[in-house]
Image: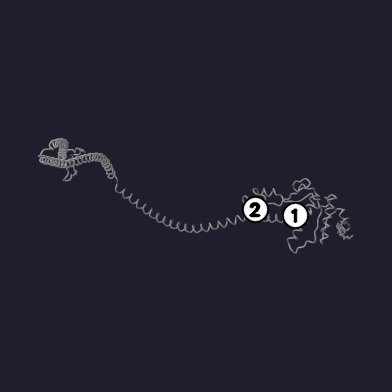
Amino acid sequence: MAHDKLKPGKPCPVCGSCEHPQPVQLAQDAPTENDVEQARAKAEAAQKIRDGLIGEGKALKEHLELDKTLLLGKGVELLGCDDLKLIAERAQAELKDVNNKITSLRLKMGFLQEKVEQYRKLAKTLEQQKAADKQAEAAAQNLRQQLAGAEGQLQELKKQLAEQNELLTDVDEQELQQEHEKLLVQQRELELQDKRLYAAIKNNQRIKQEVSGYEARRAACEAEYSLINRLSATLNGTLTGKKRVNLETYVQMHYFDKILQRANVRLLHMSRGQYELCRDKMQDADSKTGNSKTGLDLEVKDYYSGNLRSVKTLSGGESFMASLALALGLADEVQSCAGGIQLDTMFVDEGFGSLDDSSLQQAIATLQGLSEGHRLVGIISHVHYLQEMIDKKILVRKKRGQQGTGSEVALVVD
């Protein structure tokens, strides 16, 4: 094997190196190549002997079968002889001799089988040793490659070291001392900067803890603000996606609807069932997305045409009747809601001149109906027809005299 062929100063048959610092040491009982060859030769000889013994055993078995047949034939022929017992004893002796031979052959075959197994194990060990030699050769090849690479790196390092040595020889010692002092100064500055940064970090950590406390309070304040802001937006009519009606207008709308209910009772009577006042619902719908905050605009429903239209389309007389109805409705609602308050006096200023005769009579009839309920209704007007219909009047006339222009007041009771 390769271990036995190693010679000092001679190249290794595996790695090719002439130096053998650590050759593989085989175990004391490890077989040599000569032992393996002898074992292989003995195994082959034993195999041949075994094959021969097997052939002899087969031939002996056939011979025994033939002898048995012949003996049986002779026994049949000698059934009538007196020496039959002697023949049987002789056959028995021959049979015993044959059995002894067979036993001897079997022992030899067992011994040879053991030798064959031993030789086979030696052959297997040899094959394993050859495989190990191949692996060792591959490892040696790899080591040779690594050694070559390491030698190249070593040469490169030697070259770099030589260059550094050349540079060091050119450097002035005084320059090195100055550079060293500069580095010391920089080190002290960095140490001071490190201390400042450490103090700043500690201060920032303290501030972070304080900010965390403020953050918790801020979150609580934001939650409270969100609730209050939503309530404020609701009351001010600025809530997104909702009707833009503030609280004041909403309350006014509530009472305005009640006033309209009472006013319509008067207006339907004065207009002979033609007109009825109502709030503008379309404006409420537009206030969801717009900026409108009124909600108190009026429309008039004309029962003659069946349409809703703006109060601006009413004539002067119709507007006067609507205003009068609203004033009366307001008075009725105030008396209904505010217990103990009684509106006993009401003055109506102008507007009667715009009414036709029929509408004027309806208005006068409504006011007379109010006066019958212990109320005092005063009408301020220049219409001559009213002067004739009202029995209690306060007449105000212009007067011009020597003392200048003025007026005089007269109380007239018819």
- 106 or 293: nearer the viewer: 106
Q: Amino acid at mark 2?
A: Gly
**In terms of depth relative to the viewer, which is nearer, 407 or 25?**
25
Is residue 234 among what the camera can see? yes
Image quarter of residue 188: bottom left
Could you tell which of marks 1 and 2 lies nearer the N-terminus? 2
Tell whether label 2 touches label 1 (CB within 8 Å): no
Mark 2 — residue?
A: 237
Crowd band around label 1 with a 10 angstrom C-alpha radius: few (<14), some (14–19), many (20+): some
Residue 313 rendering spot, x and y as whole percentages: 77, 46
- Closer-to-camera residue (246/169): 246
Q: Give SS at disc 2.
A: loop
Quadrant of the snapshot with the C terminus: bottom right
Q: How many numbered marks are there?
A: 2
SS for tag 1? helix
- Residue 185 falls left or right of residue 253: left
Q: Position of residue 252 (x, y in %)?
A: 70, 55
Model colouring: one colour
Q: Is 159 displayed left or right of 57 in the figure?
A: right
Q: Report the residue at 35% width, 51% height from top.
A: 183
Determine which quarter of the picture holds residue 55. top left
Q: Farthest right residue?
A: 414
Relative depth, front residue between 291 and 199: 291
Quadrant (top left/top right/bottom left/bottom right) for the N terminus: top left
Name the residue beneath numbered marker 1: 261
Q: Is there any visible trace of residue 56 in the rendered image?
A: no
Image spot of residue 274 (x, y percent): 79, 49
Question: Nearer the observer, disc 1 or disc 2?
Answer: 1
User: Which quadrant holds residue 64?
Assistant: top left
Task: Give the side of residue 362 with respect to residue 104, left or right.
Answer: right
Disc marking residue 394? none
From this view, report whether residue 263 is shown above or below residue 110.
Answer: below
